[in-house]
Amino acid sequence: MSNDSWYQFLIDLLPGLGFSLQLTAGMLAIGLPLGLAFALGTSLKTKLLRYAVTGLVEVGRGVPALVLLYLVYFGLPQTGLTLDAMPSAMLALGVSFASYTAEVFRTGILAVPTGQGEAGKALGLSGPVILGRVILPQAFKIIVPPLLGWAVIYFQATSLAFALAVPELLSRAYVLATTNFQYLDMLALAAVLYAAIAIPLALLAEHLSRRDNRVRPVRALKITTDTVQPQPKEDF
């Protein structure tokens, strides 16, 4: 096959890659805040709510992502809520992503020294302010590498949306292959495009993880000493 044919096939696949990236962005927009909410929910003091959130997380982990896609796209219409294929895929993959990353968020939050929250309380800050301005900024420095790794996995999982006829990369490659009968070439090029996005991001996640492991002890000490200042004694 000529180079011109490969180049044309590659150009024809780019719209599918664009849909895959849009699907990934929508999935992350749903999954990241939902994963944080799940992590906070599993740490609630109220047992009933904590067990309910934990149950949702376990169901999200236990049910295959493809089954979630079908539940959202084919099941929700029976409850009166109908979504198109693209939003259905974003929602289903976002819930699955959130279920797996909830533990990443929870671990990162627990890794922040308890003295940071106690210092915030000593300054009279409310719980939400302590969480948003003290705990989470430090936790995100820990959880960004594993979150990036999960994002790479779920970028690849966008190929499952092929089952809902979303015109993402795999679907685009298959449809084009049915017209030119070059199945090997089209699917190989699709694999190359997936790898071109996934491999650099995976290497970046590994680099960030190694760097964070090297500097975390020093950084944590610096945050503690800068944040928690000795209080002057009062004379009575």
Image (cartoon, helix red, strand yellow):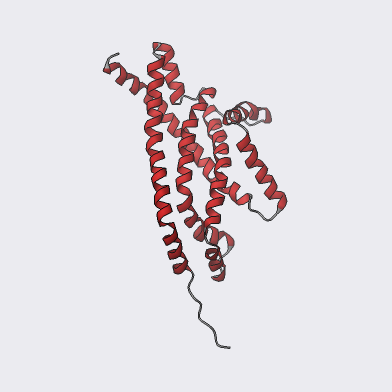
Report x, y in % for residue 227. Answer: 47, 67
For image coordinates 52% across by 27% down, the residue present is: 160
Report x, y in % for residue 40. Answer: 60, 51
Report x, y in % for residue 34. Answer: 57, 44
Residue placed most toward the observer, 51 or 126 = 51
Residue placed most toward the observer, 39 or 30 = 39
For image coordinates 54% across by 61% down, the residue present is: 130
Instruction: Place residue 148 in its image quadrant.
Output: top left
Which part of the image, by quadrant, shows the C terminus? bottom right
Q: Is residue 225 above or below residue 36?
A: below
Report x, y in % for residue 129. Answer: 54, 61
Q: How many numbered circles does the render carry? A: 0
For image coordinates 43% across by 53% down, the residue present is: 213
Query: Left of 92 or right of it: where is 159?
Result: left
Residue placed furthest toward the bottom: 236
Residue placed most toward the observer, 86 or 4 = 4
Residue placed furthest toward the left: 3
Instruction: Place residue 217 in its image quadrant.
Output: bottom left
For image coordinates 43% across by 21% down, the residue present is: 172
Which part of the image, by quadrant, shows the N terminus? top left
Q: Is residue 95 above or below residue 144?
A: above
Q: Is residue 174 above or below residue 117?
A: above
Instruction: Place residue 206 in its image quadrant.
Output: top left
Query: Left of 187 or right of it: where is 99?
Result: right
